[in-house]
Amino acid sequence: MIAVIADDFTGAAEIGGIALRQGWNAIIDTRVQKGTETDILIIATNTRSKPPQEARKTIRELTLQLLSLSPEIIYKKIDSVLRGNVGEELLEQMAVSQKRRALLIPANPSLKRVIKDGIYYYEGLPLKDSTFARNVKHQIGSSRVIDLMGDGAGKDTVVISRAELMPDKGLIIGNTTDEADLDHWAGRVDEETIMAGGSSFFNALLRKIKVHPYTDPAGFAFGKKVIYVCGSAFPLSRSVVEDARQAGQYVSYMPSRMFCKPAEKSAYMAHWEREILKGVQQSGTVIVAINVIEEPRVENLSSELGKTIATVIANVMQGVQLEELVIEGGATASAIIEKLEYRKFHPTQELAPGVIRMKVEENKSLHLTMKPGSYTWPSSIWKYSHKP
């Protein structure tokens, strides 16, 4: 068995899709359970948004639990642009696993995310100058991958190219500009090295072992009662929602004054829930999204937004039996899944790279589909035109 620890839920789902693509069985879980039978066990966490010490504690506990299952390897799935506690988590996993080094390959050449001479390039521009840097919440002040690892791990990190020897210890980032580079780094697996990185590197690792491309014999048929939850702050995501609204789709935006007065929040939430439920009952499909939030004088607003959306969706689902729940954004997905108390998932279809449809162990009549916020909606589930 191969084990994977993912630092957010959409990343875990993306790994599940790659497993399907390469002909492997996969299970996504939020905890380690003995007796799980699968080719690839993916543990979904939300450590990307946690404080470093809390993230390290989670990784320490999960690594110990996974080691007790004697997996062939424990892959560490991280954000492809190194957001979160990447270095801190890898150092903890190395210590618990008693490994000397970790090989980290975050680049995703197919999405024009590459590392050359230690500089991260996003769609041809240094990361800090890219559209991605302008659209994320936290400022990206450097394009040097060692800087992106943070003060706690940067001193332990080196960058190497294919022709160079692997250092004996520490965190090692490989310059990666194309698929050949990915395949080269995948060939560096050994007993002393933790393998870590994005979805493309994991795909290359699986290609080294077995390739039996997945084909869905039943084709793709979406259910009739659907809620899309669009929690991403990326402008393209917001624009496609607005295009859908203008095309006549039922879009329910969070009330703009949701957080203005704490005493009124429950009333706003109840109104929003009724609006969403009405939309599902009348049209079958509702897009739930955030547009404008007035006077957001709330500490940890991002977290509060996720918790509020999760509570609203959970309450709506008590009034209607959904067939499909489609969630955009890892933090939003984690909040909803935690609120619904879903723990175990079975990937069934990869609708596009990173967009994965799954069965839910705790709600067998529901399919759950996830998409990272920075990825593009596939036409198979997003039928409304949008501007490129």
Image (spheres, rainbow, N blue to C red):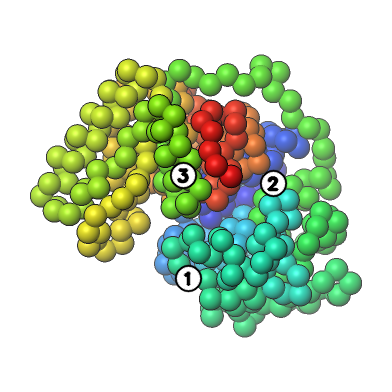
* Lower position in the chain sequence, tag 3 or tag 1: 1
Q: Which circle, 3 or 2, is nearer the viewer?
A: 3
Q: How many marks?
A: 3
The residue carrying pointer 2 sits among few (fewer than 14), some (14 to 19) or many (20 or more) residues within 10 Å by Cα, namely some
What residue occupies the far left of the structure in this picture?
A: 263
Residue drawn at point x = 54 percent, y = 65 percent: 133
Residue to which mark 3 is pinned? 239
Look at the numbered discs 2 and 1 and tell me whether their residues touch, using CB distance below 8 Å. Answer: no
Q: Which quadrant would residue 250 be assigned to in this image?
A: top left
Looking at the rendered structure, the kind of residue marked 3 is Ser
Image position of 295 (left or right of 279): left
Q: Quadrant of the N terminus?
A: top right
Q: Quadrant of the C terminus?
A: top right
Residue drawn at point x = 72 percent, y = 36 percent: 21
Vertical position of residue 119 compared to residue 211: above or below? below
Residue to which mark 2 is pinned? 2
Looking at the rendered structure, the kind of residue marked 1 is Gln
Residue to which mark 1 is pinned? 139
Residue drawn at point x = 81 percent, y = 54 percent: 179
Front-most of residues 146 and 202: 146
Residue 45 visible within the image: no
Q: What's the CA distance linking mark 3 and mark 2?
A: 39 Å
